[in-house]
Image: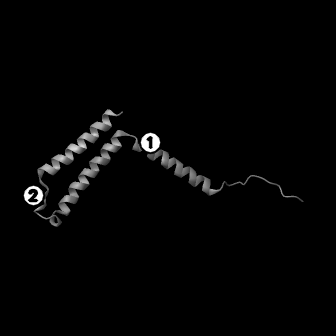
Amino acid sequence: MGRRLTKPLVQPSYNKGLHMIARWRWITNQLTKRLWFRVSLFSLLGVATALLAVVFKDFIPESLPARIGADAVANILGIIASSMLAVTTSR
């Protein structure tokens, strides 16, 4: 007798796995598009940076602030401000 082709009773598990990955990717995309998520992420990054500065303060030479100076910081802030203005007005 010939073999009958029927659908298996249990679907292969890889389909379920792929579906779960796609679902988590969709949830992640929806979450990262929210403004509060980005603000929270940058806030946590700021707090982590401050805590790391306290931990690594002994490794930074005391003469470093004198070598960098306020002029270099002002130039960097000017560059950042110009780029932000260019991005904001281009939309």
Mark 2, other Cα within 10 Å: few <14 / some 14–19 / many ≥20: few
| Image spot of residue 57 (x, y percent) | 16, 62
- The kind of residue tagged 2 is Ala
Residue furthest toward the bottom?
59
Of residues 11 and 67, which is closer to you in this image?
A: 67
**Viewer-side label of 2, 1:** 2
At a point 31% along the width and 33% down the height, the residue shown is 89
How far is the residue under mark 2 from the one under mark 1? 46 Å
Where residue 56 appears, as percent x and y from the top left, is: 19, 63
Count neighbours of disc 1 (C-alpha within 10 A) and say few if under 14, some if 14 to 19, many if 20 or more.
Answer: few
Q: Quadrant of the C terminus?
A: top left
| Residue found 62% across the figure and 57% down from its top | 13
The residue indicated by pointer 2 is 66
Res 59 quadrant in image: bottom left
Nearest to N terminus: mark 2 or mark 1: 1
Q: Secondary structure at mark 1?
A: helix
The image position of residue 1, as x and y in percent, is 90, 59
Q: Is residue 42 left or right of residue 15?
A: left
Give the residue type at disc 1: Gln
**Left or right for 29, reference 81:** right
Is mark 2 in CB contact (under 8 Å) with mark 1? no
Asked whether 61 or 31 is in front, the reply is 61
> Residue at (33%, 41%) from the top-left corner?
36
Tell me residue 28's x, y (percent).
Answer: 44, 47
Residue at x 46%, y 45% (from the top left corner): 27
Q: Secondary structure at mark 2?
A: helix
Q: Is residue 73 left or right of residue 2?
A: left
Q: Which residue is mark 1?
A: 30
Marker count (numbered) = 2
